[in-house]
Amino acid sequence: MGQSENEQARAQEPGAGELPPGQRLQRGWPVLHYGPVPRFKPLTWEFQVFGATASGDKHSWNHEGFMTLPRTTVTADLHCVTRFSMLGSRWGGVSTATVLELAPPAPDVTHVMVWAEYGFSSNLRLADFADPSSLFATHRNDEPLTVEHGFPVRMVVPHLYAWKGPKWVRGVEYMTADRRGFWEERGYHNIGDPWAEQRYSYQEVPGDGPEL
């Protein structure tokens, strides 16, 4: 039996068939965030790495210094817990591997907390943070991020739901034990794997995260 026109069209779409369960293909990029859009202040903006660093010292870059760090490009998807997915975006920015190299964690670090404007936070296992596709994005499809989408820097962790990649990132805290971030404290899953549909904390099993 032949395919319908809609089925044929979908089969020809880039990334078709790569949607995690429960997701729908999104055309365009919706603007979703909690709270106001922060005002970028280039003279006082600073990216910090602190907590359990290997040296015990805090590392920091101003905006000009951060933008001169080695850059990388990753073509990857973005899966929002609200059930839309954007496939095949070209993200440009600073790899988490670069940050880990320039500001190495102590040997006993197991997790990180990514901090953003207004005290927003999201926790990640160190392995998820260090994944080769994870980066601090400044561009999408070769265009600078808009302020609504996280300019000047947002975290992108393609293999997890998008709330794990905060907008308006200002730093990373190395941790020797897990601690829930903003949405994780408010009922979202501590890990957030879209392929396992880890959307909410009631789905967690022992070992997925700290007790609420």
Image (cartoon, rainbow, N blue to C red):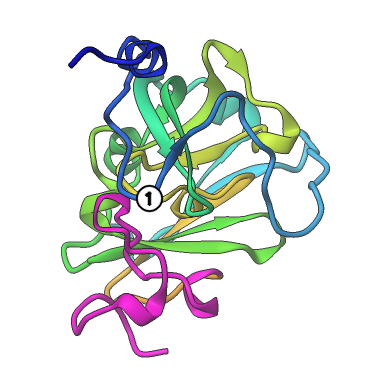
Q: Which residue is mark 1?
A: 22
Q: Is residue 146 visible?
A: yes
User: For residue 185: magenta?
Assistant: yes
Residue at 54 percent of width and 20 percent of height: 140
Residue at 81 percent of width and 53 percent of height: 36
- Where residue 12 sits, quadrant-wise, is top left
Task: Say what amino acid the circle numbered 1 marks.
Answer: Gly
Return the residue nearer the eye: 160 or 40: 160
- Vertical relation: 197 (above or below) 168: below
Left or right, residue 55 beside residue 115? left
Return the residue nearer the eye: 173 or 178: 178
Q: Which residues are magenta?
A: 183-212
- Image coords of residue 5 (percent x, y): 39, 11
Q: Is residue 104 visible?
A: no
Residue at 76 percent of width and 43 percent of height: 44
Left or right, residue 130 beside residue 34? left
Instruction: Give SS at disc 1.
Output: loop
- Vertical relation: 26 (above or below) 196: above
